[in-house]
Image (cartoon, helix red, strand yellow):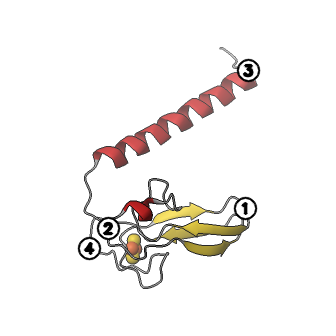
Amino acid sequence: MTFRTAPAIIDGWRHARRARLSARIRFFKETPMADPQIASRTPMAVDVEEGKAYWWCTCGKSAKQPFCDGSHKGSEFAPLKYEAPRSGTVWFCGCKHTANAPLCDGAHKKLP
Ligand code: FES
């Protein structure tokens, strides 16, 4: 029987986490998706609470922007979960073209 030290176990967890994240990034880069609807050409400021989950609309069709209202049903889109790391104001992407979903990265400035 071999015993792993605490740092080795933590390294294993970090490696597994990095591998899962890489797989998600690869999936999003390689999976062709329909263009989302531009809900707004400006980011949306929302006061969030630490630890609370928010479901960001990825399709742009929700009437409750920037959050999902179920309007994506039947499409290839699904809402994206955002868990607030701390309480405060967060700028959610409104154009749905951010590379830092669900947060604004300024992509709306480059849209045609
Ligand atoms: S309504 Fe847009 S993702 Fe749900």
Nearest the viewer among 103 and 64 is 103
Q: Which residue is mark 1?
A: 86
**Is disc 4's CB within 8 Å of ligand 1?**
no
- The span from disc 3 to disc 2 (Cα, nearest Å) is 47 Å
Q: Which is nearer the N-term, disc 4 or disc 2?
A: 2
Given this view, does label 3 or label 2 mark the residue nearer the observer?
A: 2
Q: Which residue is mark 4?
A: 74
8 sits to left or right of 19: right
Task: Using the image, tell me which numbered label, if any, was put on residue 73.
Answer: none
Query: Which quarter of the figure has residue 58?
Result: bottom left
Residue type of the residue flagged with mark 3: Thr
Nearest the viewer among 70 and 107 is 107
Q: Of helix, strand and loop, which one carries label 3?
A: loop
Q: Which is nearer the N-term, disc 3 or disc 2?
A: 3
Residue 96's x, y, as percent?
A: 40, 66
Q: Which residue is mark 2?
A: 36
Task: Using the image, tell me which numbered label, if any, was put on residue 5.
Answer: 3
Question: Which quadrant is the C terminus positioned in?
Answer: bottom left
Q: Crowding near pointer 1: few (<14 within 10 Å), some, many (20+)?
A: few
69 sits to left or right of 83: left
Given this view, does label 2 or label 1 mark the residue nearer the observer?
A: 2
